[in-house]
Amino acid sequence: MDAVRDAVRSGWIEGLDNANIFEAIPWAFPSTPMGPYSDLGGFTAIITDGPNKGNTVVFFLGKATETKSWEVFSSMIWKDEKWEPLPVQLPKQP
């Protein structure tokens, strides 16, 4: 969840405000190393307070092979009875 908080605070997920408060359920994919990620997982979150209150958001995360840190690489929000993508900017690599 730290990677999701960091991405939202840093403004890397377009359309989500830092004032949103989430309740989240983590999930994981059985995976083998894929591209830049050694592991995949995610969160389904309900925004319980803030500008997007009441919406459900999903975050897809990958554990970067080089840095070993988790990063959000994709996100969607359930809005107006459909999933809408939230553009995600990946963190800059050292």
Image (cartoon, grey):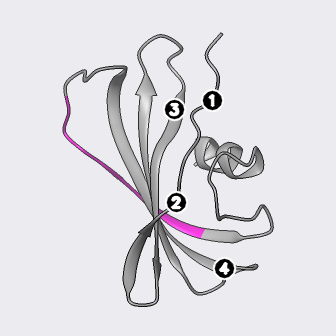
Q: Residues within 10 Å of mark 3 (few under 14, many from 20)?
A: many
* Residue 41 spot, x, y in % from top left: 36, 44
Question: Quick one: SS at disc 1?
Answer: loop
Residue beneath the point at 47% across and 10% down: 66
**Residue linked to disc 1:** 91
Which kind of residue does numbered mark 1 sit on? Answer: Pro
Disc 4 is placed on an element classified as loop
**Three-letter residue code for mark 4:** Asn
Q: Is residue 58 above or below residue 91?
A: below
Report the mark closest to the observer, 3 or 4. 4
* Residue lying at 41% horizontally and 15% vertically, measured from the top left: 65
Magenta segment boundaries in residue numbering: 23-31
Looking at the rendered structure, the kind of residue marked 3 is: Trp
Residue with the mark numbered 4: 52
Crowding near the residue tagged with mark 2, few <14, some 14–19, many ≥20 C-alpha atoms within 10 Å? some
Q: Which residue is mark 3?
A: 70
- Residue bearing the label numbered 2: 86
Instruction: Depth check: give the residue in front, 88 or 54.
Output: 88
- Work out whether mark 2 precedes mark 1 in sequence or the reverse, and give the earlier one: 2
Mark 4 and mark 2 lie on one chain; the one further toward the N terminus is 4
> How busy is the neighbourhood of tag 1: few (under 14 within 10 Å), some, or many (20 plus)?
few
